[in-house]
């Protein structure tokens, strides 16, 4: 009798608590236009505290990885920032969006067949001088294992491939390393007599691996001397840990990189976030459902342009910024947008010091006995940012050719209404995507089950720090 009475008493207490919480939820939804009501309940249920915030792991901090893997991640991130700075010199009035990890992964396969000066220039540009080939390959295997998501809503996938000319004798140890360390798909096509069909096969592979986000990896006809194409695809999709309420999205002005103004859908939410504010920029970390994965958004102060901020974007500065995030309550307003970016990286990489791999004297004797050099490096990336989450994809194709070559504070408000920089980082610190948005393109989203979508959104989780 005593135990039975005790369980009834516990049940009654739980019932009263449930009724109280239901009353809170009803009150919040009865007044959707008064955001301060939701914000107050959020503050009540999840008070701002720097002592209870969980920090997403930084490189080498809480993820169990080998020292060489942390070194390779740092090299990939460093290369990404250097490439971003090179590309940003051309025109930051347009969107710029790349995947450093996709590009470096494709080059890691090429590196397995490089020798001599070609190998040393690849290593210097990509930051692999102090990493052995065996450690490099093992590190990419380790990173690939870390990419497997724990969250049911997350999808994080990458794929590699070798597409060779029929009859071209590739060395067996090179192909074996690419299969073992990069899980590369192997295919043979006829670039000489059926170039269009070969290109169609590569594009189809990329479309499948990116879930239809990138339909055309290669848009221009390939040289009939093409003998090998190294390909990588990266796909990311996840929900925000705390979704934006669709009914709070409002049309608002955005000042583009060229100084013009356009109207964009501006999402909004309030809560507690990992945040930085200096006289030069504001920054916020928006966590995804996958533990440790975040989008870090850097908004330069209105008196400073994106080009000035881009000059500060180095790997060392990035790591310093990562240590400065503090939990703080406030409001974030962010455009719902899409971005597409594609380019041939050849001339940019040559400016960065990668000269020999693009010359007729390149030494890729670890791939084949014949003369082989890199003719082009095509990269394409796409991004959708919306109330529920983010979907991003990237694809890289290294085209190798035979023949002659050519050389506790007050609540903040962060309104992202002018050009900004951002990066999507994995739980081990790897920067999967980075870029800057100067002209957000409209992204139309239809929510067919809005009422259900509302109630599935958590109120306010504790952010990653």
Image (cartoon, rainbow, N blue to C red):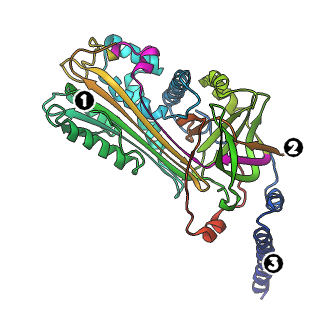
Q: Quadrant of residue 451?
A: bottom right
Q: Relative to the observer, which residue lies in front, 359 or 155?
A: 359
Taking the magenta stretch, the answer to whether it contains residue 337 is yes
Q: Which residue is at 64% across, 36% downward? A: 256
Disc 1 designates what residue? 228
- Seen in the image, is 351 located left or right of residue 238? left
Q: What segment is highlighted magenta in the picture?
A: 329-357
| Callout 2 crowding tier (Cα within 10 Å): few <14, some 14–19, many ≥20 | few
Disc 2 designates what residue? 410
Q: Relative to the observer, which residue lies in front, 152 or 346?
A: 346
| Callout 1 crowding tier (Cα within 10 Å): few <14, some 14–19, many ≥20 | many
Give the percent coordinates (x, y) of residue 384.
53, 48
Q: Helix, strand, or loop for circle 2?
A: loop
Q: Is residue 93 visible?
A: yes
Q: Quadrant of residue 428?
A: top right
Q: Which residue is at 45% across, 15% downward? A: 351
Give the percent coordinates (x, y) of residue 12.
79, 81
Q: Which residue is at 68% across, 41% downward? A: 254
Disc 3 designates what residue? 16
Q: Which residue is at 39% across, 50% downward? A: 212
Q: Nearer the viewer, mark 1 or mark 3?
A: 1
Taking the magenta stretch, the answer to whether it contains residue 14 is no
């Amino acid at each position: 009798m005593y135990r039975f009475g005790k369980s009834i008493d516990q049940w009654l207490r739980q019932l009263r608590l449930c009724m109280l919480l239901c009353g809170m939820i009803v009150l919040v939804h009865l007044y959707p236009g008064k955001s301060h009501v939701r914000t107050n309940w959020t503050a009540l249920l999840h008070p701002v505290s720097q002592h209870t915030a969980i920090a997403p792991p930084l490189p080498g901090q809480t993820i169990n990885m080998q020292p060489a893997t942390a070194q390779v991640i740092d090299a990939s991130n460093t290369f990404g920032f250097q490439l971003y700075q090179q590309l940003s010199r051309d025109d930051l009035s347009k969107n710029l969006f790349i995947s450093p990890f996709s590009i470096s992964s494709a080059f890691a396969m090429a590196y397995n067949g490089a020798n001599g000066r070609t190998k040393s220039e690849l290593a210097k540009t990509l930051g692999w001088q102090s990493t052995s080939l065996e450690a490099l390959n093992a590190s990419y295997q380790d990173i690939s294992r870390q990419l497997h998501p724990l969250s049911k809503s997350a999808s994080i996938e990458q794929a590699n491939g070798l597409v060779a000319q029929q009859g071209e004798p590739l060395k067996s140890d090179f192909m074996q390393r690419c299969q073992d360390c990069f899980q590369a798909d192997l295919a043979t096509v006829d670039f000489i007599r059926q170039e269009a069909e070969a290109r169609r096969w590569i594009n189809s592979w990329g479309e499948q691996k990116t879930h239809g986000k990138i339909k055309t990896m290669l848009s221009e006809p390939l040289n009939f001397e093409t003998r090998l194409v190294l390909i990588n695809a990266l796909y990311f999709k996840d929900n925000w840990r705390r979704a934006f309420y669709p009914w709070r999205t409002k049309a608002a002005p955005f000042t583009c990189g060229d100084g013009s103004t356009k109207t964009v859908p501006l999402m909004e939410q309030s809560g507690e976030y990992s945040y930085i504010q200096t006289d030069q920029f504001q920054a916020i970390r928006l966590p995804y459902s996958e533990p440790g994965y975040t989008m870090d958004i850097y908004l330069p102060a209105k008196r400073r342009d994106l080009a000035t901020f881009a000059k500060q974007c180095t790997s060392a500065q990035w790591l310093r910024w990562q240590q400065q995030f503090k939990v703080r309550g406030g409001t974030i307003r962010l455009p719902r947008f899409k971005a597409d970016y594609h380019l041939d990286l050849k001339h940019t990489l040559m400016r960065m010091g990668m000269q020999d791999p693009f010359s007729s004297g390149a030494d890729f004797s670890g791939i084949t006995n014949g003369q082989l050099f890199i003719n082009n490096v095509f990269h394409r990336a796409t991004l959708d940012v919306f109330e529920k989450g983010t979907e991003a994809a990237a694809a890289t194709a290294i085209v190798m050719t035979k023949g002659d070559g050519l050389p506790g504070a007050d609540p903040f408000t962060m309104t992202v209404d002018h050009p900004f920089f951002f990066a999507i980082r994995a739980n081990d610190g790897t920067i999967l995507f980075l870029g800057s948005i100067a002209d957000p393109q409209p992204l139309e989203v239809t929510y067919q089950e809005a009422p259900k979508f509302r109630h599935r959104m958590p109120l306010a989780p504790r952010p990653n720090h």
